[in-house]
Image: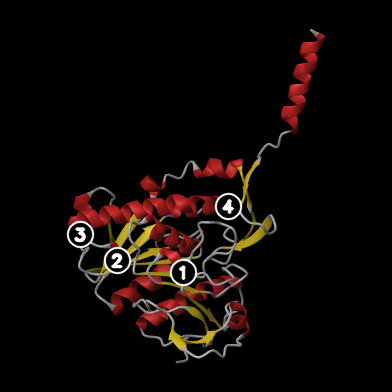
């Protein structure tokens, strides 16, 4: 009897010593607690060690059921048409044209389908060309104040988006080769994941200040193998945005950290989509080639060659790191 009581006491002591919310995975090799800034400017101290509670929260996010897809065309430039996965009629009765290119826009953390990035890019694309613009709303997975949970939800959303693209193409006869995927912040990494999920590569993928926190050692991060041509615009590098080069072509406007006319990291982070939007309208952002990203950040770029940033056309075969300067206020392009 005494031995049984001792074993019970030992078991209680062991269980009591276990952490209530054990760590499952370390997202980064860096500091455990890092500041992450949302697009609305709010700053949150985030734990980069994913705990059991984070995984419990992600179980509530069923991306296949909860993501929504909003189609805009020149026939409906202001009010979207909802495309419902596996509902062929929703695609065939919409304004989606499989003969046109498709721009797929993915927002970032704490954002949704009416985020400033979306409301800037949709009219820009429709101004530039007659095409399909689809906005991915994964806000059920992105609008958690627990940044780590949003990072963990990113692959689930990417998988669901890839299934959506596959279904849409099968239903309408569209081709992956005609897709341009654009993502901001966490959405930039998701854009690359979508590209890697598809059977063939989109012709163009753009990362708009891809997030840094949670992606330094993360295999799901944005990379050049995600599309036939990949381009990355760094506007808050090393703070909210990814620091080093991660695409076929990487642009570091104004050195890639602090943008003229900005007084906050949120403003710097948002400049990526403002610059890109202006490039779609025809803004002439011409970068000077740099030897390294460090050279681009310091403005010491003396290699031969220039390249225009952004726009609606991919630049297959191009590679390298580029720097250019902007104005503090619109029009941002100096060229």
What is the number of the mark on residue 173? Answer: 3
* Residue found at x 23% / y 69%: 100
Q: Is residue 102 left or right of residue 321?
A: left
* Residue found at x 52% / y 50%: 152
Query: Which residue is tagged 4?
Result: 148
Q: CA distance from mark 2 to mark 3?
A: 12 Å
Residue 36 at what x, y percent from top left?
A: 61, 62
Residue 13 occupies quadrant? top right
Q: Are marks 3 and 4 in contact (CB under 8 Å)?
A: no
Query: Which residue is tagged 1?
Result: 207
* Precedes in sequence: disc 1 or disc 3: 3
- Mark in the foreground, 2 or 3: 2
Outermost top residue: 1
Visible residue check, residue 43: no
Assign a secondary structure to mark 1. Answer: strand
Q: CA distance from mark 3 to mark 4?
A: 38 Å
* Precedes in sequence: disc 3 or disc 4: 4
Outermost right residue: 2
Q: Is residue 137 above or below residue 182?
A: above
- Mark in the foreground, 3 or 4: 3
* Residue found at x 39% / y 61%: 195
Q: CA distance from mark 2 to mark 1?
A: 18 Å
* Precedes in sequence: disc 2 or disc 1: 2
Residue 194 at what x, y percent from top left?
A: 40, 58
Query: Which residue is tagged 2?
Result: 177
Pointer 3 local density, CA inside 10 Å: few below 14, some 14–19, many at least 20? few
Q: Are marks 2 and 1 in contact (CB under 8 Å)?
A: no
Assign a secondary structure to mark 3. Answer: loop
Q: CA distance from mark 4 to mark 1?
A: 20 Å
* Residue found at x 57% / y 88%: 301
């Amino acid at each position: 009897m005494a031995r049984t009581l001792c074993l019970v006491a030992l078991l209680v002591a062991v269980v009591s010593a276990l952490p209530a919310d054990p760590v499952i995975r370390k997202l980064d090799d860096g500091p455990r607690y890092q500041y992450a800034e949302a697009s609305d400017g709010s700053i949150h101290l985030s734990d980069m060690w994913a705990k059991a509670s984070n995984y419990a929260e992600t179980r509530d996010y069923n991306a296949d059921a909860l993501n929504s897809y909003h189609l805009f065309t020149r026939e409906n430039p202001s009010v979207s048409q909802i495309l419902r996965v596996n509902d062929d009629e929703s695609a065939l009765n919409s304004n989606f044209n499989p003969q046109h290119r498709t721009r797929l826009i993915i927002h970032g953390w704490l954002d949704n389908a009416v985020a400033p990035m979306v409301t800037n890019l949709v009219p820009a694309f429709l101004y530039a060309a007659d095409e399909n613009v689809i906005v991915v709303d994964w806000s059920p997975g992105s609008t958690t104040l627990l940044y780590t949970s949003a990072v963990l939800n990113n692959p689930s959303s990417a998988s669901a988006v890839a299934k959506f693209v596959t279904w849409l193409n099968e239903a309408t006869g569209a081709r992956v080769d005609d897709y341009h995927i654009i993502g901001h912040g966490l959405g930039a990494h998701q854009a690359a994941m979508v590209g890697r999920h598809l059977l063939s590569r989109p012709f163009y993928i753009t990362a708009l200040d891809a997030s840094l926190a949670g992606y330094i050692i993360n295999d799901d991060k944005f990379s050049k193998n995600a599309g036939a041509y990949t381009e990355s615009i760094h506007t808050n590098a090393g703070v909210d945005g990814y620091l080093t080069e991660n695409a076929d072509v990487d642009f570091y406007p104004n050195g890639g950290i602090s943008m003229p006319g900005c007084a906050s990291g949120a403003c710097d982070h948002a400049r990526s989509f403002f610059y890109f939007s202006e490039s779609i309208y025809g803004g002439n952002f011409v970068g000077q080639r740099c030897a390294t990203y460090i050279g681009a950040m310091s403005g010491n770029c003396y290699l031969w060659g220039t390249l225009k940033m952004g726009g609606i056309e991919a630049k297959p075969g191009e590679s390298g790191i580029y720097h250019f300067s902007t104005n503090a206020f619109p029009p941002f392009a100096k060229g």
